Amino acid sequence: MARHIKLKLIFQDRLGIVADIAAVLAQKGLNIISMEVQKQKDLAYTFVESMKESDVLDVQDLLAGLRQIPNCVEISTIHTLPQEKREEGYKVVLDSVSDGILSIDENGLITTINCVARKILGCGNAGIIGHTLDSLGLADTSLSESLVRDGPHSEKRNTFTGKGRFQYFSTCKPIKDTSDRIVGAVEIMKDLKEIEALAHAVSQPGQVTFSDIVGVSTPIKDVISLAQKISKTGAIVSLRGESGTGKELFARAIHFESQRKGPFVPINCAALPESLLESELFGYEGGAFTGARAKGKFGLFEIARDGTVFLDEIAEMSLKVQAKMLRLIQEKQIRRIGGSVEIPINARIITATNRNLEQRVETKKFREDFYYRINVLPIHLPPLRRHTEDIPELVEHFLFQLTTRLGKNARTLDRPAHEKLLSHDWPGNVRELKNVIERAAILSAGDVIGKDCILFSFELGKNIVSLRQNKKFYNGRQPLRELMDRYEKDLLAEALSQSQSIRRTASLLNISHTTLLNKIKKYKIKLANK
């Protein structure tokens, strides 16, 4: 029966150490299975695994012979070689990733297959390392073809296992050595369901986390810290702050952090008249009033189920609806308009307002009992003028979003443009900053945005003539119609950002509501809860 031994040998570094070790092992009748040398400063750490065909091995005699080698510092037996530790570490890492990984060497022999790939290919725990790729019975040959084809190759595939069909996205590419010679190939397998789920999560604008909130200033970090602490509770949250400070963004982040199973359902209390707001919140039974649906309608609290209802502009809610909301909070149930059945409600409530609720309570425009019910956990969002140190990071964020959406080169601001932004009072807060940056990116023809393209709302009328004459605005290749469309889109976006509703904006611009809607659609203007 053969005997194995693993050794760690430390020598003062010099030429010929490996040859000397091999000579002693051969003299003692041992074969070398593996040898690894690691140099650290002036020392050579040598790790050896050797084997003797006979079951008789005098270890002490072997160690004594090795110690006779010149410049020997230390020799000891070990249980695990560095190579074995690395291999086990690689195996743990490979089995921890969510993708399937399969690799072959230049001869088509399998060198790596992690547990996910085994599951996808239906080969279980069979010992297939060192076997040919053909032993897996795969119909596809893309991995083998990567041994002779440069560059990656990706495609969707199907495989059939004992549990049925499995769909995955496969990427195959060659493995090269330092001489750029192909020495193998690797295949990465991604579950199509996971890809679809990831794409869905990324494409959903409602999926907002606290990491999406841009800002490094103390006021913003303090607000985020407070919001994170109360997210996991079921208590009502009241978001207070000026218009444009990001109240809905925080509401969505609180909902996401709470990990509630239901959806996030927002509604602007100022956008609907009292009768419509009541039916939207609480729903109605069929035939409850003229124009009602025959089958009735679910209210937003029923739609939210175990999720979150976000009541924006809560200060504009009528006293009658406030009374019904107060009962909902106290009883945890609602009754649809025209209905007699009490419906249990488990949705969390987050409110938001830019108004002074305390003042409205004093003037009897807001119920005092309702105020105390919703003001359990108030969060005051700071205006932008109190954390201007976040402006550079916000600018970078908005420019990145814009250039990514439009597929254009990255944009930056020059120093005078930054200085102009920092000197502004920002009555419209972060929303105003976003509008200014988008306008500047549109007006600037170059990749560096100058001060002359940073226009605030009060500057649009007096500065537009000079902008048209500026070479950065007109490069001599754009038709007049395109320039006029750009200007009209910019003006409409600014007007919409300064008004409470689309209908009000249309009235101020002296155009019909339908005309404004058509222009919004034409220019693909994004609205903020209009």
Image (tube, helix red, strand yellow):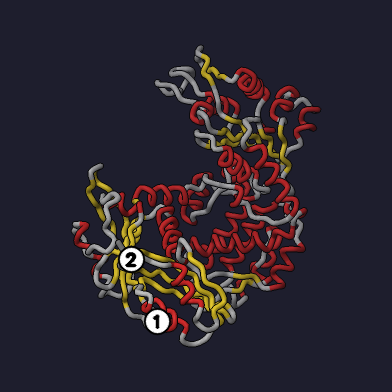
Label 2 sits on residue: 186
Q: Position of residue 248 (x, y in %)?
A: 61, 43
In the picture of the structure, the residue carrying the numbered disc 1 is 23
Which residue, as the protein is rendered here, is positioned at the far bottom? 15
Residue type indicated by callout 1: Ala
| Left or right placement of residue 154 versus residue 421 in this view | left
User: SS class of the residue under badge 1?
Assistant: helix
Looking at the image, which residue is at 73% across and 24% down?
A: 367
Task: Count residues near mark 2 (Cα–Cα under 10 Å), then give few for <14, some for 14-19, many for 20+.
Answer: many
Which residue is at the front of the view, 132 or 421? 132
Amino acid, disc 2:
Val
Q: Secondary structure at mark 2?
A: strand
Asked which quadrant contains residue 309, the reply is top right
| Crowd rating for badge 1 (residues with CA inside 10 Å; few <14, some 14–19, many 20+) | some
User: CA–CA distance between discs 2 and 1?
Assistant: 39 Å
Query: In the rendering, at what x and y percent does residue 493 appear?
Result: 58, 54
Image-based side of 394 in relation to 359, left or right: left
The residue at the point 48 percent across, 17 percent down is 288
Viewer can see residue 485: yes
- Residue 338, percent from left and from top: 50, 15
Cβ atoms at labels 2 and 1 below 8 Å apart? no
Residue 308, horizontal then vertical, whole percent: 56, 33
Is 239 or 462 nearer to us in this picture?
A: 239
Q: Quadrant of the C terminus?
A: top right
